[in-house]
């Protein structure tokens, strides 16, 4: 019994310390997931430390991939494409927007080193035996002879300059792969380049690697090419590959070659690439972006699924994503039990049962894991929009089936559902437009009459079931007849590249564009820009709380909030590690969730609900919301929803299950209710509150009294 009490006391002190410091310092908390993400490159140093270049910065493991930590201090751009290991503690990172960064302490701290580098989009890094560093960019090749302090352009002889990949052989000859330009070689440290494409039948080069015998291998979209004469002549060596979309290579000490592919997993060759065999046992994500060997172990970096490791040369694979949460979040949806679902690029769909729970992948039957949009109807049926049409789940995400009858399998960028549970999807690209289903996704009908563009990025529906579609380049369209016809409603809309749409409880519409936020108070007839204080005008996600607070997620500017319908904005980025916020949502307990492009999901440390809440309408299910504030002293508010008239009890319990207070014990009408608990006479600690309604509904939540 003594040890049990010590456990409770320790847990209580930890909760007090954590919640107290978070509430005072940061608006945002990292939810710790979903785990996985896009791995652009894997490197290791002589100590066996592993480094990942990801869309969420650089991650490091010092225990062969068992655990990962983000090492991003000073890294102002999290989209890392390439990583180069120098000495034991020297690292270089090439990024999409921020150029090149250097760390001299094993990744703990980074500084930008871009002197002389006019193009900050860096795709490849390499170094020669003299320590010279070469950077492949969209403006060609740059060289540094002083550890990255200064860079010089070296493009003489290059006819195309979009450099994708780079490798250096034992003679310090440099080979570069140019997207749609083939291969080039320099034999004089980059001063001059010559094209070396003889025998190369595809110029879409994804990767170049060179083995210890100086044989060169090129990965293209149509197979593998090999040269054994320094690039003078290439021959295709793809026998045994079941897919020819090849992305990366690595070699072990025995000379075996491992090739990662874009849709078929990993292949191995033990005969210098003459023949290949598939080695995918345990590899549940077959979109391989990077591959490497460290300490004799084989690592595969995937598109969306994080890292896999093999201890037996690829015969068996295990997922190794502990601490790795660099997922790209494209969509949120919340069910009637306040469970959060997140759609990701490459990783499929994840479910978060509660604030203190862990994310879990729910992808059974989901054959396309690039999820752009999510929707949910009044029966909690889920719908996922992917790059290959719509999938639906009737069992809370546990199982998915394709639901595309009558609709081209285009990229589904948006889903909206009206009060009759009619489903509308907006597609993006050829054969696209807007489609509608009136039978839970079983059948679809094209509803694009009046649309002049196929690029529909977002949809929203107001309280009158009017539908609004945001498009790329053509602004906003409205339908007042259930999607039968559409008309453009762009008066006052200075920018017609629409990323996101939302509507508040008062029917006010908001549009996020590439040049700010626009508001309409007359059902879309007229729009006014409302960007005062908006420090980043590229607004790609919007959501509204129950109290009509407006939250905007931006491209590299983080999250901003407006409490006056967009009239004024304030930045709320404390605790937010990634400022590229691709999705944003508020749950029924008024916690804000921010989905980032490369660092998973963050949520607000506290509910943003005001103490007094005003609700209208009738709830569709029993719901017990998280109290506000939490932690509290001495009073807190508990909100709950009753879909039918019922006998209701709300009781307070200690950690040991002792009932210490009854707040409600009576028959109550259907609707929205709240009750206050004044804990003035109670000691600080962790308590539980429980809603018991009727004969079957019981829900319990935890809160902290902090005096």
Image (cartoon, rainbow, N blue to C red):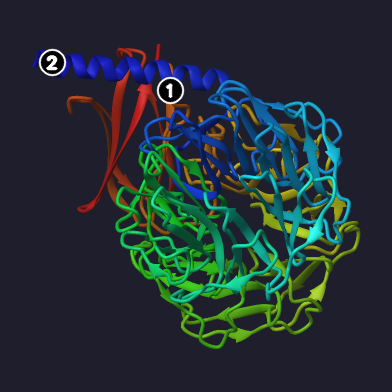
Is residue 459 at all visible to an observer of this figure? no
From the viewer's side, name the closer residue of 676 and 548.
548
From the viewer's side, name the closer residue of 89 and 605.
89
Where does the image place residue 657, in percent across and percent down from the top left?
A: 18, 28
In this picture, residue 701 sits left or right of residue 572: left
Q: Residues within 10 Å of mark 2 (few under 14, many from 20)?
A: few
The image quarter containing residue 35 is top left
Q: Most extreme residue toward the left, as rendered?
A: 1
Q: Residue at the location (76% across, 35% down)?
A: 569
Residue under pointer 2:
3
Q: Residue at the location (69% across, 78% down)?
A: 433
Q: Quadrant of the N terminus?
A: top left
In this picture, residue 682 sits left or right of residue 298: left
Which label sits on residue 631?
1
C-alpha distance separating marks 2 and 1: 26 Å
Tag 1, which secondary structure?
loop
In this picture, residue 55 sits left or right of residue 288: right
Where does the image place residue 95, in percent across and percent down from the top left?
A: 69, 42
Q: Nearer the viewer, mark 2 or mark 1?
A: 2
Q: Residues within 10 Å of mark 1 (few under 14, many from 20)?
A: many
From the viewer's side, name the closer residue of 249 and 647.
249
């Amino acid at each position: 019994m003594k040890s049990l009490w010590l456990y409770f006391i320790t847990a209580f002190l930890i909760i007090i310390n954590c919640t107290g410091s978070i509430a005072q310092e940061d608006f945002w908390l990292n939810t710790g997931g979903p785990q996985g993400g896009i791995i652009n490159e894997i490197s290791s140093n002589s100590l066996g430390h592993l480094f990942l270049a990801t869309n969420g910065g650089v991650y490091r493991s010092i225990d062969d991939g068992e655990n990962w930590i983000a090492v991003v201090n000073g890294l102002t751009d999290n989209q890392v494409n390439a990583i180069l290991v120098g000495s034991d503690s020297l690292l270089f990172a090439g990024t999409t927007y921020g150029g090149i960064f250097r760390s001299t302490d094993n990744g703990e701290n980074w500084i930008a080193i871009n002197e002389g580098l006019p193009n900050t989009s860096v795709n490849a890094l390499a170094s020669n035996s003299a320590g010279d560093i070469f950077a492949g960019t969209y403006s060609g090749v740059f060289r540094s002879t002083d550890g990255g302090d200064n860079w010089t352009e070296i493009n003489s002889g290059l006819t195309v300059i979009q450099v994708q990949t780079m490798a250096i052989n034992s003679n310090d000859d440099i080979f570069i792969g140019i997207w749609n330009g083939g291969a080039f070689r320099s034999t004089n440290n980059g001063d001059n380049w010559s094209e070396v494409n003889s025998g190369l039948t595809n110029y879409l080069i994804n990767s170049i690697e060179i083995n210890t015998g100086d044989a060169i291998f090129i990965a293209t979209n149509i197979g593998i090419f090999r040269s054994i004469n320094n690039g003078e002549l290439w021959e295709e060596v793809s026998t045994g590959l079941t897919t020819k979309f090849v992305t990366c290579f690595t070699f072990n000490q025995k000379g075996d070659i491992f090739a990662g592919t874009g849709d078929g997993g990993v292949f191995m060759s033990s005969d210098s690439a003459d023949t290949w065999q598939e080695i995918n046992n345990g590899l549940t994500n077959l979109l391989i972006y990077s591959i490497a060997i460290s300490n004799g172990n084989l690592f595969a970096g995937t598109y969306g699924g994080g890292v896999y490791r093999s201890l037996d040369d690829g015969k068996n694979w295990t997922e190794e994503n502990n601490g790795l949460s660099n997922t790209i979040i494209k969509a949120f949806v919340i069910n009637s039990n306040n469970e959060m679902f997140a759609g990701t690029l490459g990783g499929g769909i994840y479910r978060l049962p509660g604030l203190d729970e862990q994310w879990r992948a729910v992808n059974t039957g989901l054959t396309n894991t690039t999820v752009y949009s999510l929707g949910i109807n009044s029966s909690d049926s889920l719908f996922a929009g992917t790059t290959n049409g719509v999938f639906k789940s009737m069992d809370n995400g546990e199982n998915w089936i394709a639901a595309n009858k009558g609709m081209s399998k285009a990229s589904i960028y948006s889903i909206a559902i009206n009060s009759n549970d009619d489903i509308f999807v907006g597609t993006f690209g050829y054969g696209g437009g807007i489609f509608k289903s009136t039978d839970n996704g079983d059948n679809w009908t094209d509803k694009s009459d009046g649309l002049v563009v196929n690029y529909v990025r977002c949809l929203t529906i107001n309280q009158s079931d009017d539908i609004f579609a945001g498009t790329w380049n053509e602004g906003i369209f409205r339908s007042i007849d259930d999607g039968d016809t559409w008309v453009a409603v762009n008066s006052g809309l200075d920018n017609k590249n629409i990323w996101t749409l939302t509507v508040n409880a008062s029917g006010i519409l908001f549009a996020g564009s590439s040049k700010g936020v626009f508001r309409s108070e007359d059902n879309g007839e007229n729009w006014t820009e409302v960007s005062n204080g908006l420090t980043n005008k590229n607004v790609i996600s919007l959501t509204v709380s129950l109290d009509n607070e407006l939250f905007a997620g931006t491209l590299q500017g983080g999250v901003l909030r407006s409490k006056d319908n967009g009239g004024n904005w304030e930045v709320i980025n404390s605790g937010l590690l990634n400022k590229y916020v691709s999705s944003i949502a508020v749950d029924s307990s008024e916690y804000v969730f921010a989905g980032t492009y490369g660092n998973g999901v963050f949520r607000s440390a506290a509910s943003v609900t005001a103490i007094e809440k005003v609700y209208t309408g009738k709830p569709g299910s029993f719901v017990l919301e998280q109290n506000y504030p939490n932690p509290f002293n001495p009073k807190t508010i508990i909100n709950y929803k009753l879909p039918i008239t019922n006998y209701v009890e709300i009781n307070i319990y200690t950690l040991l299950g002792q009932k210490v207070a009854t707040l409600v014990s009576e028959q109550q009408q259907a609707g929205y209710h709240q009750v206050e608990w004044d804990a003035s006479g109670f000691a600080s600690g962790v308590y539980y509150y429980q809603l018991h309604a009727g004969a079957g509904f019981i829900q319990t939540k935890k809160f902290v009294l902090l005096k």
